Image: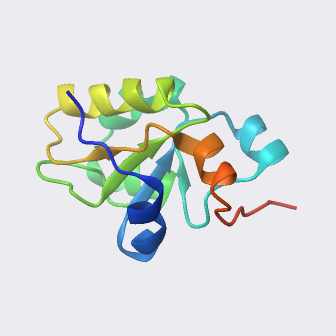
Amino acid sequence: MSAEIQFEELKENLGNLTVVDVRSSGEIAKLGCIPGSVNIPLTEIEEAINLDGEDFKDKYGIDKPEGSCPHIVTHCMKGGRAQKAYDALAAAGVEDHRVYMGSFNDWVANGGEVSKTE
């Protein structure tokens, strides 16, 4: 069972959370992303988890999630990949992280700001 986060809580805490977007870079380029999110595509999650802390930070720009990480939230387009990423982090020993099951579709439907890359 995953620890879910809902739109309002995510929106209110964006600056205090590390939001991991597990969609492909192509999806993000086309549709945008939740402001401040970090892209780690689901296809890279297991490889990313196995990187040492320094290599992880060099590649993704954030500290590698280990142990208790209540500030980590996974999301995708509709929730399926976000749950798989959540499960992969849990299998790697990461605790207390969250999943945004509504994901990007819910974010947009609720009027959440979207960042677009040029």
Nearest the eye: 101 or 90: 101
Q: Is residue 92 left or right of residue 101?
A: left
For the C terminus, the image quarter is: bottom right
Measuring from the top left, give residue 7's x and y in whole percent.
47, 56
Task: Count the marks.
Answer: 0
Q: Is residue 3 left or right of residue 63?
A: left
Instruction: Choose top left, top right, bottom left or bottom right for residue 12.
Output: bottom left
Q: Residue furthest right?
A: 118
For the point 73% across and 45% down, the residue is: 28
For the N terminus, the image quarter is: top left
For the point 73% across and 64% down, the residue is: 115
Q: Can residue 50 be spotted in the picture?
A: no
Nearest the eye: 53 or 67: 67
Nearest the eye: 54 or 103: 103
Instruction: Choose top left, top right, bottom left or bottom right for residue 100.
Output: top left
Measuring from the top left, give residue 104's x and y in whole percent.
61, 44
Q: How is the image coloured?
A: rainbow
For the point 62% across and 35% down, the residue is: 77
Measuring from the top left, give residue 68's x and y in whole percent.
12, 52
For the point 60% across and 52% down, the residue is: 107
Q: Can residue 105 be spotted in the picture?
A: yes
Measuring from the top left, give residue 23's x and y in whole percent.
61, 35
Nearest the eye: 21 or 57: 21
In this rendering, the answer to whether 13 lies above or below 50 is: below
In this rendering, the answer to whether 51 lies above or below 73 is: above
Q: Is residue 4 left or right of residue 95?
A: right
